[in-house]
Amino acid sequence: MNDPNGYLTARKKERTGEQTLPATHHRLLLTCYFWRYLTVQSVHRLLSEQYPSTSDTTAKLHARQLRDRGLLKEVRRSLNQRYVYAITRRGYHLIRHRLPDNNPWTREEAVRDGALDHELAISAVQTDLFHLVQQRSDADLIQFDRRYFHHSQHLPYTDREGIGRRLEPDLGSLLLIRKPATWYLLQMFLEQDMGTESPAAFAAKLQSYADWYADRGADYLTALYAQHHAPDPQPTFRLHVVTQSRRSGGTDFDQLIRLYTQSLHLPGTIRRSIYFTTRHLIRQQSGNPLAQPIWYPARDFRRSWLNEIEGDLSSPGKQPHVYRFVGDHLGTMTRWPTLPLAAGAGDGTV
């Protein structure tokens, strides 16, 4: 068949997912897959080696070229918002051969009001983590996971009442951390609060981590670390909580205290794995916020506090007293808690 310009061949490759792309476009697609939602500014920052210029013009051009080919799509809630890019099914199939077996396709779209802001906040923390690990010689990032809602990524467990449930963190990341004589793995989770959850709902979320860990979580973590050949796999993990307030007259720190208080009744093994900060504190940092002393460890709760506030926890009218008490007694902030990356509990014990 005469095809002097290669047009028919190109169309066939396009239909069968055999399109060939420049390496720069492949990296952009992979980045959009693992981050789910990204602005052009975030793409420019993540792929700084690919886009060394201080301007994001080239990154914007590449994103639009991939959009025009149906490999990326633009998402935004209103005309006043900047474009956010997400990978399409066609784009996913083009890079699928480069992904681990357990990375599924999921439809990327903001389905409810505020969902896009939530996803972009998660992407910002994910980017900070990526850059922090890149800057260090004593750590490697093994994998990211943003799709725990997908059936192939579920973290199932049975709660204390015998009901089958599933844990769905906002972000999961597996890190390899080197020490002078050995190394270990650490699974990290993120919960990004946007000020829309009540303290009771957040308490239930924290309890789900405790139930998951007690039922299947410890075995899951040990098996995960053994799968990656960790020398002495221990069932450790970290949960980072970033809070912000949407209450009239409230502050991010007020919301932090409300949510921090909900960890009071958790087992000590779980409290030692949880660290809180606020969106405001993150935005104030000139450097990488994950490397700054802005994280409040939940392990600083003292059982002696229970004697003073136990009765108030169940009384809505007295709960503000609880929040003020906790705020006055909140422990010293710590750096990102994954020794030797920073000071804190990261020595391989929960």
Image (spheres, rainbow, N blue to C red):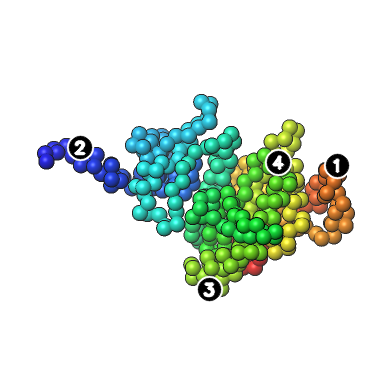
| Numbered disc total | 4
Q: Amino acid at mark 1?
A: Gly
Other residues around mark 4 within 10 Å, as few (<14) / some (14–19) / many (≥20): many
**Nearer to us: label 2 or label 3:** 2
Q: Which residue in the structure is indicated by mark 2? A: 7
Measure the C-alpha gap from mark 4 to mark 3.
Answer: 41 Å
Q: Is residue 84 visible?
A: yes
Q: Is 137 rendered above or below residue 151?
A: below
SS label for mark 1:
helix
SS label for mark 2:
helix
Sequence-first disc among 2 and 1: 2
Q: Residue furthest left?
A: 2
Q: Residue at x 80, y 50 (%)?
A: 326
Q: Which residue in the structure is indicated by mark 4? A: 252
Q: Are marks 2 and 4 in contact (CB under 8 Å)?
A: no
Q: Is 342 rendered above or below residue 322?
A: below
Q: Which residue in the structure is indicated by mark 3? A: 231
Sequence-first disc among 4 and 3: 3
Residue 272 image point, x, y percent: 69, 61
Q: Residue furthest front?
A: 162
Sequence-first disc among 4 and 1: 4
Q: Residue at x 77, y 57 (%)?
A: 265
Q: Residue at x 56, y 51 (%)?
A: 171
Residue 136 image point, x, y percent: 52, 58
